[in-house]
Image (cartoon, helix red, strand yellow):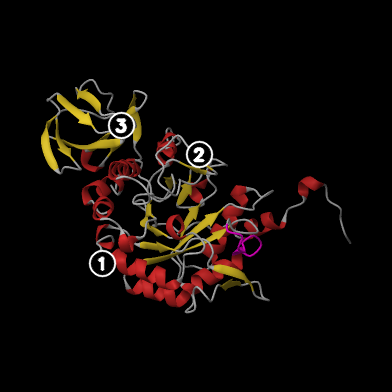
């Protein structure tokens, strides 16, 4: 006998699936510090990716010292998939990836690196390839079979979908297959994921895409915006970040159409924000200056500090800002960020700065210069170059 229950008692298929996996959860003990790696999209987009490129990126990550300083994920973004078979399983583009994803994952793992892949919560990906909607379990099954370590999950072609339901459904599908996979939520901050995604994913995008050409700010190109504009959207989000759950202002554009000073500032500010460090340049032919920025151990240590605190703004003078990031062992990172096209003259009287948890005397290290320059009893007169930064680490003096 059919009973016509009132609408409020009817459950969607999606809700039923979520209830079935009520005990499911995201994988713990992943991304205890912000993940670091390389993603194919910003340089290669759809047309440029193939298995040879991905293998060469893994090789170069090792040979040029990125692996040694913490980069570990090699992530294939959109356009590796072309359809579904009669059973609903995703079909790999065999022209681009003739050896298959498992063989590619094996190669990346042989380098002691981790393998990442891309899909979308909607019917189709942003590049028009098959999305995971209604195929979450089948896709998660394949990812586990291929030994995937990281899933970037986009939000194109998702009209009418509920973001929390959609991302929770894929989280549970991943967990069902028992292979720990870092889950990267990429819904561009539309649904304020910082408020709900801590128990769903490990990182979540807070903004639309960064410009592919490393644009500083001011201009707009479709949904791509300058990297300094993205920083403005992180203000106030620091309370939502921590080990295993990080705000993500998008991938790095270091080495992609950007001068050295801006690359240094961009990289530094991402480290101050405890952001994932996902570079997207062609590692094989990057300039020496780009390599030196991406592999600076002292700056990376600010990002990877195990205290797990996102930095926050403590001074704003229009085009000149000062940011603070609490570090382990009572240390403090202080970044002076000059967004202007002119040099900024500035005098630091440490007692006058509104630094939180600032007690006693600290020695001062200029991180980019890798030198100690005094202590916080000293007044410092300095110049911050145009569209650049000065980065200090304050260490308590016992």
Q: Can you say which quadrant of the picture contains the N terminus? A: bottom right
Q: In the displayed image of the protein, which residue is found farthest to the right? A: 1
For the point 16% across and 25% down, the residue is 381
Is label 1 or label 2 in front? 2
Q: CA distance from mark 3 to mark 2?
A: 21 Å
Q: Identify the image quadrant of residue 242.
A: top left
Is label 3 or label 2 in front? 2
Say few, some or many: other residues with alpha carbon within 10 Å of mark 1 (under 14 / 14 to 19 / 20 or more).
few
Q: Identify the image quadrant of residue 149.
A: bottom left
Magenta-highlighted residues:
127-136
What secondary structure is marked by label 1?
A: helix
Say few, some or many: other residues with alpha carbon within 10 Å of mark 2 (under 14 / 14 to 19 / 20 or more).
few
What secondary structure is marked by label 2?
A: strand
Task: Name the residue that disc number 3 marks.
Answer: 338
Q: In the displayed image of the protein, which residue is found farthest to the top? A: 352
Contact, mark 1 vs mark 2 (Cβ under 8 Å)? no
Instruction: Give percent across and percent down for residue 21.
Output: 60, 60
Q: Is residue 333 visible?
A: no
Task: Name the residue that disc number 1 marks.
Answer: 63
Left-right relation of 161 to 324: right
Say few, some or many: other residues with alpha carbon within 10 Å of mark 3 (under 14 / 14 to 19 / 20 or more).
many
Instruction: Out of 312 and 321, give the one closest to the viewer.
Output: 321
Q: CA distance from mark 3 to mark 1?
A: 34 Å
Q: Can you say which quadrant of the picture contains the C terminus? A: top left
- The disc placed on residue 220 is 2
For the point 36% across and 66% down, the residue is 57
Instruction: Give percent across and percent down for residue 302.
Output: 27, 45
Which badge, 3 or 2, comes first in the chain's sequence? 2
């Amino acid at each position: 006998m059919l009973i016509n229950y009132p609408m409020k008692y009817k459950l969607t298929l999606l809700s039923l699936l979520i209830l079935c996996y009520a005990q499911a959860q995201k994988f713990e003990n992943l991304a205890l510090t912000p993940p670091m790696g390389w993603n194919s999209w910003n340089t290669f987009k759809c047309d440029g990716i193939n298995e040879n490129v991905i293998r060469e990126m893994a090789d170069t990550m090792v040979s040029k010292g990125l692996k040694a300083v913490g980069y570990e994920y090699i992530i294939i973004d959109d356009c590796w998939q072309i359809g579904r078979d009669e059973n609903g399983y995703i079909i790999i583009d065999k022209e681009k990836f003739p050896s298959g994803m498992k063989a590619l994952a094996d190669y990346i793992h042989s380098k002691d690196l981790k393998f990442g892949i891309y899909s979308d919560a909607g019917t189709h990906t942003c590049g028009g390839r098959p999305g995971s909607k209604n195929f979450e379990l089948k896709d998660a099954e394949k990812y586990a079979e291929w030994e995937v370590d990281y899933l970037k999950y986009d939000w194109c072609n998702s009209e009418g979908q509920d973001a929390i339901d959609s991302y929770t459904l894929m989280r549970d599908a991943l967990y069902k297959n028992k292979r720990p996979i870092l889950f990267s939520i990429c819904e561009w901050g539309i649904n304020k994921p910082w408020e709900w995604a801590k128990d769903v994913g490990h990182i979540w995008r807070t903004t639309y895409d960064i410009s592919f050409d490393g644009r500083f700010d001011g201009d707009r190109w479709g949904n791509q915006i300058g990297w300094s504009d993205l920083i403005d959207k992180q203000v106030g989000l620091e309370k939502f970040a921590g080990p295993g759950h990080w705000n993500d202002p998008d991938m790095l554009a270091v080495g992609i159409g950007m001068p050295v000073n801006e690359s240094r500032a961009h990289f530094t500010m991402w480290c101050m924000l405890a952001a994932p460090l996902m570079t997207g340049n062609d590692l094989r032919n990057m300039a020496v200056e780009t390599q030196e920025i991406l592999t600076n151990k002292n700056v990376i240590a600010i990002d990877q500090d195990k205290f797990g605190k996102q930095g926050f703004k403590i001074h704003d003078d229009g085009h000149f800002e000062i940011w603070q990031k609490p570090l382990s062992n009572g240390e403090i990172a202080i970044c002076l960020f000059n967004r202007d096209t002119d040099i900024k003259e500035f005098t630091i009287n440490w007692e006058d700065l509104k630094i939180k948890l600032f007690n006693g005397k600290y020695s001062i290290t200029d991180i980019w210069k890798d030198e100690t320059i005094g202590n916080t009893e000293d007044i410092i007169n300095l110049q911050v170059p145009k569209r650049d930064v000065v980065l200090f680490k304050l260490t308590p003096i016992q």
